[in-house]
Image: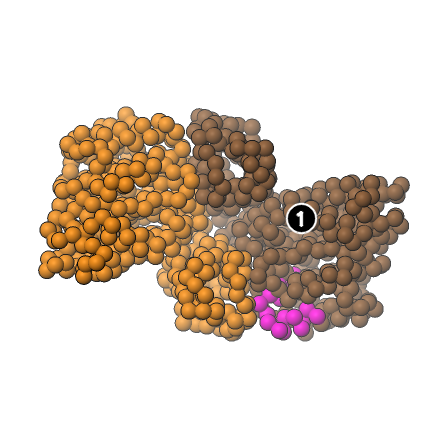
Chain colours: A orange, B brown
Amino acid sequence: MIPKGFLFSAVEAAIKKPGRRDLALIYSQQEATMAGTFTTNRVKAAPVRLDMRRIKTGRGQAIIVNSGNANACTGDVGMRDAREMARLVAHDLKLSPSLVYVCSTGGIGTPMPMGRLRSGLSEVTAGLGACSINDVAAAIMTTDTYPKIASRTLKVNGGTGTLAGICKGAGMICPRMATMLCFLMTDIAVDRKALDTALRHAVVRSFHRITVDGDMSTNDTVLIMANGMLGNRPVTEKSRAYGAFRDALDDITFELSKMIVKDGEGATKLIEVEVRGARNEAEAEKAAFSVAKSNLVKTAMYGNDANWGRIMAALGYSGISFSEERVDISFGKVPVVRDGVSNGRDADAEKVLREKEVRITIDLKRGRSSARVLTCDLTEEYIRVNATYRT
Amino acid sequence: MIPKGFLFSAVEAAIKKPGRRDLALIYSQQEATMAGTFTTNRVKAAPVRLDMRRIKTGRGQAIIVNSGNANACTGDVGMRDAREMARLVAHDLKLSPSLVYVCSTGGIGTPMPMGRLRSGLSEVTAGLGACSINDVAAAIMTTDTYPKIASRTLKVNGGTGTLAGICKGAGMICPRMATMLCFLMTDIAVDRKALDTALRHAVVRSFHRITVDGDMSTNDTVLIMANGMLGNRPVTEKSRAYGAFRDALDDITFELSKMIVKDGEGATKLIEVEVRGARNEAEAEKAAFSVAKSNLVKTAMYGNDANWGRIMAALGYSGISFSEERVDISFGKVPVVRDGVSNGRDADAEKVLREKEVRITIDLKRGRSSARVLTCDLTEEYIRVNATYRT
């Protein structure tokens, strides 16, 4: 389901290898309220720096996005190129350049192929409306193996609004934003502050709680556009509809973040690490990430090995304080560790590990807080993808 | 070269698969001054906790060590077993149990096979002197592919003293102690305080500056025994000989730590990451570790890909502050990045990457401090070793 008033376009601009679309445009027929979150990496790609300035206005109408080149570590040239991309799109669409956001994903350190891009840009604006949201989701993929789309409808003031999102991920996926781009769209009118608050609430519990390889990217961006074409009174934090809107946004971002991990480079299974019984949520999150990021845990999961000793070791170096002799660990519903020692159930647990989705539950028995982090297994295919990424 | 007065033994106690020695003993004919450093993982194996208490006396005469079982996460039984190992060795050698140190390495969470171990222990004490230091170095291996030994001689008060060390590593190798055991021996008499200070100085710049997979183990231990059989006046921190002793210890530990990384699970090459131009050493170390631990940098090195963008990204999320537009990066002597942007030399750099040892030099141009961290590439073989570790 697509929210009203959004048009799409995707073309081949020859940034990637021939035969793959690599330039896409999302356009709202009406100027939209916007919010965004960006990578916390100190090294930020030029388009990220540009968008971070633009988002301060809370307004926008188009997102131009390319795959195949991150436009990161490209110096002054990179910023000039990002600005030119926005300007060319703005010119064709008769918009102010300040309403055009630019996103790039791909390899770092190579200047953008502006010659090819310029013709691609006129093509992509000319083709607006000829493509579906799926085409855009496919065009932004790098090492992703499938496009990632999610949507929800919800009742607002008697009308039915739609919220849709697409994203790409696959590598350089780490807490506090990953190499990921996510574009969210809704036809529900939402006041700027409410949109920003709801987005931050959603991102903290979705894209900030996933890891594929622990590497944080220079380009991560989440943007949401609310064009108000449903015609409702704008939703504020005090509106009745705000809760439902926030829940829908939480759902979509969680669903998309789960797709990213499932499609992690080389991954054969999704692993959910839940830490319970922590003193507070920050402690639970820290412990869960330590386990979720451990190469040894991730390779054991790949090998269907209920090697819980590696989980204990990862908890031990996580930096939180806890008592080893109180820890319980389960794989799925099989309790393998009770009070810090083996329960003799490793063989049963190994059956659980053969599933495509595995839940590891760790109870620290210190308090009532919990956190859940999504990760994937680490396989030979991850190595192959990343050893040959540029060849 | 072996320091005077040290005897060795290694036997098969059937802890590992048949055909591999897995129980070894190091014995000093004379009671020795001892110092040690241990894992900072909160989850510590029983023998580590035992040794941490014993080392407070600064005295010792024997080290009993097994591979194939880490005796970690084994509860009260584990501590009882570690104590029994020390007691049985002490009985056979007619020593106080407090002079016997216990080390274990291998899988976590399985109780020690004490039945088989007890007969192994009488065999290993009976065989004392029949084995070489090489046999011990081989018996403590887990996924290591070769034994690791280093030694130096130095003049002390007119005599020639010897310092020798062995270690094992391979997996769970991370800063602040790795899954590694290291035993250092010298016949030079060294005062307890000087021995402790020199050991800490050496460990900080060797074993604390290596990473294979970023996982910190529950069992890491470095022990040094100085039995004084050279007959010199004990070396103190004020002695003339102290500098030479400390240098020799620094050399040996660096050499051994380099061997550990070279023999990292699945590694095909050694990578030295040097960060220069930092404000202080801690900042340099933090930046170097962020690069050295990045799976994306490590897979690029495996693929001989001069993908410096991944280095910039890892610096960016290291947590230190720096200016992207000042950073220089070289592979070997090839400068690939100058002032934050590409130097157009990637093809030349790729020749350097085909070597077995690669040096990555990063200049932040912020100050005069530097730090060097050793790492290895990440390969399909690492995945295979760790996905099937217990099968």
Query: Percent position (x, y) of residue A332?
Result: 40, 68
Q: Residues within 10 Å of mark 1 (few under 14, many from 20)?
A: many
Is residue A192 visible in the rendered structure shown here?
yes
Residue pointed to by mark 1: B203
Q: How many marks?
A: 1
Q: Is residue B63 left or right of residue B229?
A: left
Q: Is residue A225 left or right of residue A282?
A: left
**Residue at 70% of width from left, 70% of height from top?**
B83
Magenta-colored stretch includes residue B73: yes
A287 and A16: which is toward the camera: A287
A211 and A34: which is toward the camera: A34
Query: Percent position (x, y) of residue B357?
Result: 59, 37
Which of the 4 quarters of the picture holds residue B113? bottom right
Residue placed farthest to the front in the image? A238
Magenta-colored stretch includes residue A388: no
Is residue A259 visible in the rendered structure shown here?
no
Pinpoint the chain carrying mark 1: B
**Residue at 67% of width from left, 73% of height from top?**
B80
**Which portion, as a residue range, is magenta?**
B67-83
Looking at the rendered structure, the kind of residue marked 1 is: Val
- Where is A56 relative to A330, above or below? above
Provide the secondary structure element on which disc 1 rests: helix
Q: Is residue A204 left or right of residue A247?
A: right
Query: Percent position (x, y) of residue A14?
Result: 28, 32
**Residue at 39% of width from left, 29% of height from top?**
A75
Query: Percent position (x, y) of residue B372?
Result: 59, 39
**Residue at 27% of width from left, 50% of height from top?**
A196
- Where is B227 relative to B303, above or below? below
